[in-house]
Amino acid sequence: MKIKKQNDQLYLFADKVAKINEETEKRSQEAEERIKIQRKEALLSAKEELQNERQELEQEVKQRRQELSRLENRLLEKEERMEGKIQQVTERENDLAKKLDELYEKEDYLADLVQKQMQELERISGISGEEAKRILLEQMEKELKIEAAQLIRENENYIRETSNVKAREILSLTMQRCAIDQVVESTVSVVNLPNDEMKGRIIGREGRNIRALETLTGVDLIIDDTPEAVVLSSFDPVRREIARFALEKLISDGRIHPVRIEDMVTKAEEEIKELMFKEGEAAALSLGIMNLHAEVIRTLGRLYYRTSYGQNVLKHSVEVGNLAGSIALEIGANVELAKRAGLLHDIGKALDQDQEGTHVQLGVDFARKFGESEEIVHCIEAHHDNVTANTVEAELIKIADALSAGRPGARRDTLEIYIKRIKKLEEIATSYEGIKRSFAVQAGREVRVMVQPQSFDDAAANKLARDIAKRIEAEMDYPGQIRVTVVREVRTTEIAK
């Protein structure tokens, strides 16, 4: 009886298995049918899309052929007009040639006539033509010297009266035209997070993610209690920007691990290089400078992330170019040369972190290397008085550089620090005996000392300048250089009665 029940159960189980197999086979066939239908629909959709694209392409080709046909007709018309103009020019040239021959004939006739008159005058006056010419030139030379001296005296008086007013007017107009926003750069950047859980993912297991990011970028990541934010700290703005860009990409991507971090940092470096090139190109285009070497543009772009006393150096260079060009236009100097020199005057600051030397010398060598003219090189070399400026444009670059750096808010130095430095310079200069007055000029980069002439001879004036310079070096902290100029003036006046 037991065996019979087991057999019945086996038969029932076999029937169930058979039904399941049939159902499975049926569903498989239905799935295959659906897949076939979907493939046919996809194929039809692809064919329709291909047909539409082909029609659009044919339409575009047709339009371009029509445009080429119109251009060809316009060129033919221009060619016909040019042929007519060439014929007119040829006729004018023939007329001019005839008139030129007539002029040559008249010139020969007049030359003969003048020769005969000269011979007659020599006979009547009893002196030769050369001797008469010499006497006349001597008289004219005396008269011209007197007139020149009078003109020089009048012009000196006029220039002395109007030069200060005109200079202030030119500088005022130029500064109004070239106003550029100034933003003081900081040494930190903040990256916003979608939530505070992301901080743990950035740190990673046992800190491996944050160590990888800091090692690859050279930037310190500060993760504290600030909600939904990470602070990036570095004195190198390029490294800080690479780290910010890579971290933002990692956060949006969601996959944060050392290998992914390395890939993102590499991509960020490439994109920052492209951005710097675009910024350098945009700076050159904004001044209308079109023929710069690609390496010069690339190096200019590095100044986009370079600051000097908190001032963005690329924006400062563009402003110096604009200021120098505007002043050059007002006084009749070379505008293009002034703009180009203004843009390139601080290019050495893009190199001084990687190479030895001052930014002036590095800029001079770089400009010569990439084919800049000697006028541009001289402007770069003279803009901090390393050499004496012997061109108008070089002086303009010095003026524009001082204007740009001296704008309110352009540099990080506060007014209080600036005033203290000026007062300290004047106190040191006037602490010696025999000093009339002292003036700190050029934003504290030069101090001029007026001495009593009876108390100092030339040797003593030289020693005084050296002593003041040594005291300034020992007692003050300042950027760059400070020039000490001692003025010893002796005036002698007599009155003709």
Image (tube, rainbow, N blue to C red):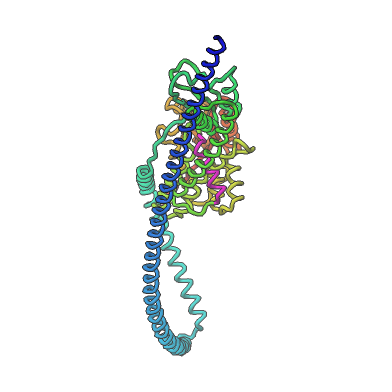
Quarter of the image containing the N terminus? Answer: top right
Q: Position of residue 59 (x, y in %)?
A: 38, 59
The residue most toward the front is 1
Q: Residue at 52% across / 80% down in the picture?
A: 130
Q: Write down the quadrant of residue 458 in the picture.
A: top right
Residue 146 in view: yes
Tell me, yes or no, whether the highlighted magenta stretch contains residue 294. Answer: yes
Q: Is residue 127 left or right of residue 163?
A: right
Please say if 133 is above or below 6: below
Please say if 461 is above or below 85: above
Residue 455 in view: no
Dominant SS type (magenta): helix
Q: Position of residue 192 (x, y in %)?
A: 44, 25
The residue most toward the top is 1
Please say if 432 is above or below 404: above
Q: Nearer the viewer, residue 13 or 44?
A: 13
Q: Residue at 60% across / 29% down in the picture?
A: 259
Q: Residue at 58% across / 18% down in the picture?
A: 205
Q: Position of residue 394 (x, y in %)?
A: 50, 48
Question: Which segment is the magenta one?
Answer: 293-307
Q: How many marks?
A: 0
Q: Nearer the viewer, residue 7 or 287?
A: 7
Q: Nearer the viewer, residue 270 or 451?
A: 270
Q: Nearer the viewer, residue 58 or 315?
A: 58
